[in-house]
Image (spheres, rainbow, N blue to C red):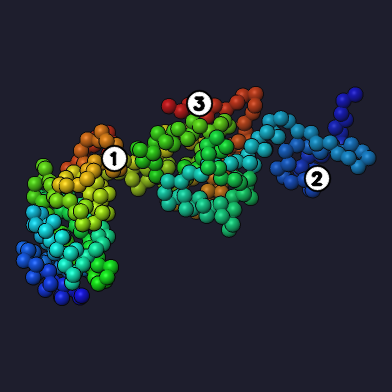
Amino acid sequence: MGIDNSNSVTPEQNPELPKDFPGEVIAAGNGGNIVVTSIDTIINWSRANSLWPLVFGTSCCAIEMMATGASKHDWARFGTEVARATPRQADLIVIAGTIVNKMGPVLKRLYDQMAEPKYVIAMGACAISGGPFYYNSYSVIKGADHVIPVDVYVPGCPPRPEALLYGIMELQKKIKTESISNPRDPMQGFI
Amino acid sequence: MNSQELKTKIESFGIEITFPEEESQFLTLIVNPNQLHQLAKQLKENIDTSFDYMFCQTGIDWLENMEVVYHLRSTSKEHEVVVRTQITDRENPTLDSVYDLWKTADFHEREIFDLLGIRFNNHPDLRRIFLDDDWEGYPLRKDYVDEINIVEL
């Protein structure tokens, strides 16, 4: 037997399907359709569109992150929906603000407590490099990537909500390149 | 009371005070560190001044000396004054605590001790507030060096 996929329709061929539809639709006759996809596509699609961020903000970038979550910009439009107050339930940590030496071990611990797959966005100059505190500071870690591996860097001081949304979209693109046959190790290449 | 009336009143306390020349928002007094507590007590307890609220306490390192600045306000009389005092001993700067007059001095003095190393006599719990307990040195001092953490510009 086997499925005759000569009737299959890709998103490009059918304008009714959204462009990012994760699979193909096969017309099965009698009005019904069969959706065919790969495990990788469907898992990546669902992971990328249900990123749950951790409630974590250490300075002014957090205000901008809250604005991104509020009604005007509303990051729920991109699936980055419910901010979780526990790392056990979060997939994404947006490092929104300065990380000082005393906060370093706390950040590392929160990251370790998150279940895989987990992703990190470094938001703003402080999280990227220490920003305005790079010089002449005795207390600031010069880049959060000295503590945990970072997936996406969003520059700005602080970045506007649009910039953070763009960072989230870039992270989604990155997630969509993953494969369960070769699982990603977030610590790979991180010293 | 306006600044001029306050100045006249405070001069009548009989404590050696100088008034700096430069313009400022509040009436400013400079007092010797050994008379600071005496002045603070008078400012708080005198019925005409009654400074019952210390809204800021700051430490400054001027290299040649250390300075502590007290911003005082009276909630009943609605006037403010700034008291400055300069300590010349950089090695072992000490000052009398005003914790007995304004309880808010507890954390303010711990912060000044933590970052500038000024010790306050009669403070109930003088230990570091922000930095780790085993931190060496006082990072807001102008001569503080930390070759590991600080990138000099």
Nearest to the eye among marks 3 and 1: give it. Answer: 1
Letter of the chain that mark 1 sits on in the rendering:
B
Mark in the foreground, 3 or 2: 3
Task: Tell me if B69 is positioned left or right of A35 in this view.
Answer: left
Mark 2 is surrounded, within 10 Å at the Cα level, by few (under 14), some (14 to 19) or many (20 or more) other residues, namely few
Vertical position of residue B20 compared to residue B90: above or below: below
- Residue at the image position 92 percent from the left and 38 percent from the top: A29
Chain bearing tag 3 is A
Residue B144 seen anywhere in this rendered image of the structure: yes
Residue B101 at x, y percent in the picture: 21, 57
Cα separation between marks 3 and 1: 33 Å
Return the residue nearer the eye: A20 or A82. Answer: A82
Q: Position of residue A73 (x, y in %)?
A: 58, 55
- Picture coordinates of residue B140, whole percent (x, y): 22, 46
Are tags 1 and 2 found on a single chain? no
- At label 3, the amino acid type is Gln
Identify residue for label 2: A14
Which dot marks residue A188? 3
Q: Residues within 10 Å of mark 1 (few under 14, many from 20)?
A: some
Q: Are marks 1 and 2 in contact (CB under 8 Å)?
A: no
The residue pinned by badge 1 equals B131
